[in-house]
Image: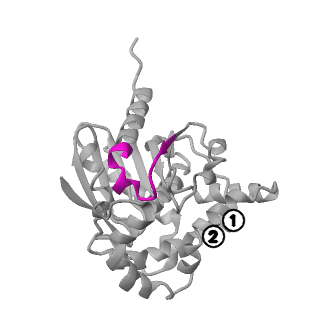
Amino acid sequence: MSTISVTRDSIRLEVVVEGNPHGPTIVLVHGWPDTHALWDRVVPLLTGEFRVVRYDNRGAGSSSVPARVRDYRLEELARDLFAVVDAVGAGEPVHLLGHDWGAVICWEAVCEPGAAGRIASYTSVSGPNLDHLGLWMRRSLRSGRFAGPLAQAVASAYTVLFQIPGVPIPVLRWVLAPNWARFVGLFDHADPSVISPAPTLGDDMVHGLMLYRANIRRRLVSPRERVTEVPVQLVLARRDRAVRPVGYEDTGHRVPNLRREQLDAGHWSPRTHPAQLARLTAEFVRQAAERDSPRQI
């Protein structure tokens, strides 16, 4: 295992590289309020076959913490991801695995022009493309189908508080952070012992609020038409109480090469179901590698 720093403009990203140096490269991207440690139980199941790269997003762990809300826009975070990809990819397309806001960031990246030349496949877990979600909500409401958008709105109600500067900070720092393992255990009906918060959790929670303030209203109010040619695997956690599977109804319209897989898990599946998640990711990466390899004549 080695640790490197990748710098883009004034942002320094802490990157961990481990596993089989000759295998395909998988880049793992975490969400809120995690760091690269989110993947601690998944990585050992992949390193025998793959080269595994994970990093702390801006605002988390050991990476830089910009002060301005606009510095946390998805466009900036996708550029961070591409900077990591360029630094570790050795000129070859990499595979992505993203969770929560990490999945949202990966969606932003794979929908960029030319992404298919740099990203070979993407496995998305518990994090939507915000533009796809906004367009789906508009279509559903216009057609009088209110149940799906209402279910997601209820699941995302906490994000309204996250939009208010200053309001949630004491609760996050002094109530939620010290009890995070217990909270996730209750939220996901899981064993709290599998939740290992990073020592920077309190700070990561607060800094990560910028993600919500920089992107939620902006993308849902003015969604863009975004498509990708990158093969995408949607891992749908059936018991996810934060991201409802119904919100992916229209994804196939904008992702021609789409695979859907069900997982009997809650929101934090990288912690609670690492074996199943590693297996699904490995299978999808192998399929992409076989498809892209030159045919034998």
Taking the spot 33% from the left edge, 74% from the top edge, the residue there is 201
Q: What x and y, as percent, mark residue 147?
A: 71, 58
Residue 272 sits in quarter: bottom left
Measured as percent of width and height from the top left, residue 203 is found at 35, 79
For residue 206, say whether it is visible. Answer: yes
Where residue 105 sits in the image (x, y, percent)? 48, 59
* Residue at the (39%, 41%) spot, across then down: 281
**Which contiguous range is marked in magenta?**
261-277
Q: Secondary structure at mark 1?
A: loop
Q: Helix or strand or loop: what does disc 2 sit on?
A: helix
Disc 1 marks a residue whose amino acid type is Ser
Amino acid, disc 2: Arg
**Residue situated furthest left in the rendering:** 1
- Residue 215, quarter of picture: bottom right
Q: Are marks 1 and 2 in contact (CB under 8 Å)?
A: yes
Return the residue at label 1. Answer: 222
User: What whole-number distance in Å separates the C-alpha atoms at marks 1 and 2?
Assistant: 6 Å
Which residue bears the numbered disc 2? 218
Q: Is residue 66 visible?
A: no
Left or right? Give the position of 27 relative to 223: left
